[in-house]
Amino acid sequence: MTWTERQTTNHPRSTSQGNEQVNEPISFTLRGANKGARIAVPLALATLADGLVFGIFARQAGLSLVEAVLMSTFVCAGSAQYIALTLWGQPGAMLPLVLATLVINLRHVLMGASIERWFAGLSWRQTYGAAYFLSDESWALTTHELKAGGRDLAFMVGSGIILSCAWIAGTGMGQVLSGAVNDPKQWGLDFAFVAVFAALLVSLRRGKTDILPWCVAAVIAVAAYRWLPHPWYILAGGLAGSIAGAWRDIRHERNQGKQHETSDIEVNQREVCIRE
């Protein structure tokens, strides 16, 4: 992965004139990575607490300090790691463990697809280097940064590094402190995971138009949690919300197109009247 001063690529963006090709400078610099790291610090504190909880549960499941830290370093997927602990050490659990991890992490396909167009002009080293640090938190922060006008994609690398370090450090701390904190619920640490995603959801809110995909995702996820095997509710909710959001955007673009057509007709009529 290499840093560059600045490079430019073209990609579509919805504007007041409808969908058009807009030249926007896309960069991948150390400055952008530093900005991502700074902004991720508040979330990193919550991630540290969540990692601490995982470390405690990992010790209770029989993982050593080295095993738990290595898992958080190379897997670095909180929800999948929690699922892995429930299956750890059970006879014949390898295939269910792999399938559960695959299903839970399929949401990364959705997250990656939502920001793929921004990375189209970068080198493969930069693209896949940034993709390594793709997580729920780094994706949410990067998406918010892009919507706010930021165009330095190293932002995701910086935020991802800070969040990963917090998760790994929390795991180690949890292993060390597992003897003193047997039940994380007594300290309210189990709520850290929920608090992180609640904060991310609020930060991504753009307005009333977000209510539909959020409600669809929530309803489908709750229904899937009740009627389908455990990991599938994550993917089901994500897909349902994505489809609802895509339908919303398509409808919005069509309405904008009709408004532009109406405006063009009115302008033409005025020009004809003036000529007459």
Image (cartoon, grey):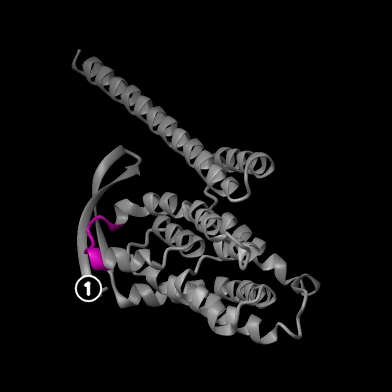
| Residue 114 rendering spot, x and y as whole percentages | 39, 50
Q: Residue at x 70, y 75 (%)?
A: 60
Give the side of residue 136 with respect to residue 82, left or right: left
In the foreground, 118 or 75: 75
In the foreground, 80 or 8: 80
Looking at the image, is 165 positioned above or below residue 20? below
* Residue located farthest toward the right when viewing the structure as drawn: 186
Quarter the N terminus occupies: bottom left
Say which residue label 1 marks.
5
| Residue 270 rendering spot, x and y as whole percentages | 27, 20
| Residue 11 rendering spot, x and y as whole percentages | 26, 49
* Residue located farthest toward the top when viewing the structure as drawn: 276
Give the side of residue 4 with respect to residue 215, left or right: left
Q: Residue at x 43, y 33 (%)?
A: 252
User: Looking at numbered disc 1 in the image, what kind of residue is underneath it?
Assistant: Glu
Q: Write down the quadrant of residue 209 in the picture.
A: top right
Looking at the image, is 204 positioned above or below residue 71? above
The secondary element bearing badge 1 is classed as strand
Instruction: Specify start and end residues of the magenta stretch as a single range.
Output: 119-125
In the foreground, 135 or 62: 62
